[in-house]
Amino acid sequence: MKLIIAIVQDDDANPLINALMSKGIGITKLATTGGFLRAGNTTLISGVEDDKLDLALSTIEETCRSRQQIVPSSTPMNDSSGGYMNYSFPVTVGGATIFVLDVAQFLKV
Ligand code: 2BA
């Protein structure tokens, strides 16, 4: 058995949960925050039998899109004004960041 941890964008979370559940793959959804953008994202955890791993991964890949997000930033002006220069830059987020771990034990008590 494997444990999939998939970090996805909020907009992809519900379609992905629906797609996985319709294929008999159980999911737990966690509301999380990315360390770089400090913006909300969604982490899904799923314990899957080995023979369903490829199905789960391909479903994630098919459902999650990459998107550009604009990151606002500012930097101190290089003069005596004490002012700041505002600028922004784009980053590409997603489709999904996925970790696959071996499960040592799976218990429901
Ligand atoms: P965030 O940390 O908010 O990162 C959002 C996006 O910002 C990243 O998209 C990447 O394109 C960009 N980014 C991240 N760190 C950067 C840096 N130091 N310089 C420039 N750009 C940077 P993704 O790579 O698709 O990651 C989406 C989310 O997946 C991340 O949100 C984070 O929550 C999670 N994640 C990514 N890599 C991870 C890792 N190694 N461990 C744990 N979580 C991870």
Image: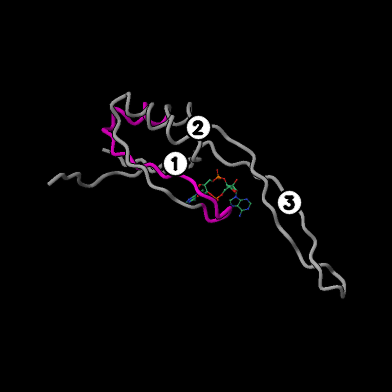
Quickly name the residue at label 1: 98
Quickly name the residue at label 2: 64
Residue 9 position (above or below residue 77): above
Side (left or right) of 93 relative to 77: left
Identify the image quadrant of the N terminus: top left
Residue at 37 percent of width and 28 percent of height: 18
Where residue 51 sits in the image (x, y, percent)?
A: 28, 27
Q: Secondary structure at mark 1?
A: strand
Where residue 83 sits in the image (x, y, percent)?
A: 81, 69
Image quadrant assignment for residue 87: bottom right
Q: Nearer the viewer, residue 90 or 100?
A: 90
Q: Secondary structure at mark 2?
A: loop
Quickly name the residue at label 3: 88
Identify the amino acid type marked 1.
Answer: Ile
Identify the amino acid type marked 2.
Answer: Cys
Q: What is the distance, in whole Å, between disc 1 and disc 3 at their CAs?
A: 28 Å
Where residue 86 sits in the image (x, y, percent)?
A: 77, 58
Image quadrant assignment for residue 48: top left
The residue range painted magenta reads 34-57
Side (left or right) of 13 relative to 85: left
Q: Nearer the N terminus, badge 1 or badge 3?
A: 3
Side (left or right) of 46 relative to 92: left
Q: Are marks 2 and 3 in contact (CB under 8 Å)?
A: no
Task: Let me know if residue 36 is in the magenta part.
Answer: yes
Task: Let me know if residue 49 is in the magenta part.
Answer: yes
